[in-house]
Amino acid sequence: MMRFLMMVCIALLFANVAIAINPDEVLKDPALETRARALSVDIRCLVCQNQSIDDSDADLAKDLRTLVRERLTAGDSDEDIKKFLVARYGKFILLRPPVQGETYLLWFGPLLILLLGGIGTFIFVRRQRYKPLLPSDTGLTADEEKRITALLKGDPQP
């Protein structure tokens, strides 16, 4: 029973990918089809934003998958196809943009924010550690002691 449930879960996991690629999009040459699938995984669907064209069901994704396959059939290299798509749609179309001067913030920004947050937390905790919770002299003054003694004896005015 457990094995059956595992197989159903795996089938459901890959069902979306199986639906995304239409049979008429598949190339006859397995090597070209493998390259097309690898390229499709790296190209962003401009409609879905955070999905690759390999996973997306959008019409634009289908058109881009077809375009990739046509260019592969024409003999273009993977880099040529990526350059063509970047020239047409901008670097946003790549799910993994290259590490360049203009993308440093994209690649290293999260690490910088994490480091700044860690340093800020360290400084905050360090300052709190040495801050006394109560004033060091918690004793009563002489007037306060006289007032308390008088109140305990039942004398309303000291």
Image: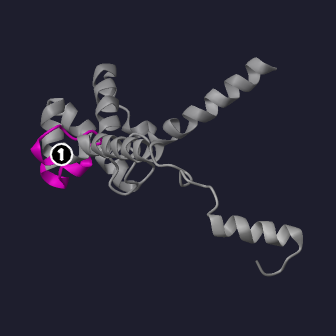
Element type at mark 1? helix
Residue 64: where, in percent of width, then height?
29, 47
Residues drawn in magenta: 87-103
Residue 13's quadrant in the figure?
A: top right
Viewer-proximal residue, 72 or 140?
140
Relative to 9, 135 lies left or right: left
The type of residue carrying mark 1 is Thr
- Classify residue 152 as left or right of residue 131: right
Furthest-right residue in this view: 154
Q: Quadrant of residue 140?
A: bottom right
Question: Is 30 above or below relative to 141?
Answer: above
Residue pictured at 36% horizontal, 44% vertical: 123
| Position of 79 relative to 60 (above/below) | above
Q: Quadrant of the C terminus?
A: bottom right
Which residue occupies 68% across, 68% down?
Answer: 144
Residue 134 point in image, percent of width and height = 56, 53
Residue 125 in the image, given as x and y percentages of width and height: 44, 43
The residue identified by callout 1 is 103
Q: How many marks?
A: 1
Q: Is residue 52 left or right of residue 5?
A: left
Q: Label 1 crowding class (10 Å Cα cut-off): few <14, some 14-19, many 20+?
A: few
Coloring applied to the structure: one colour
Residue 53 shows in this picture: no
Residue beneath the point at 37% across and 48% down: 62
Give x and y (percent) for residue 117: 36, 46
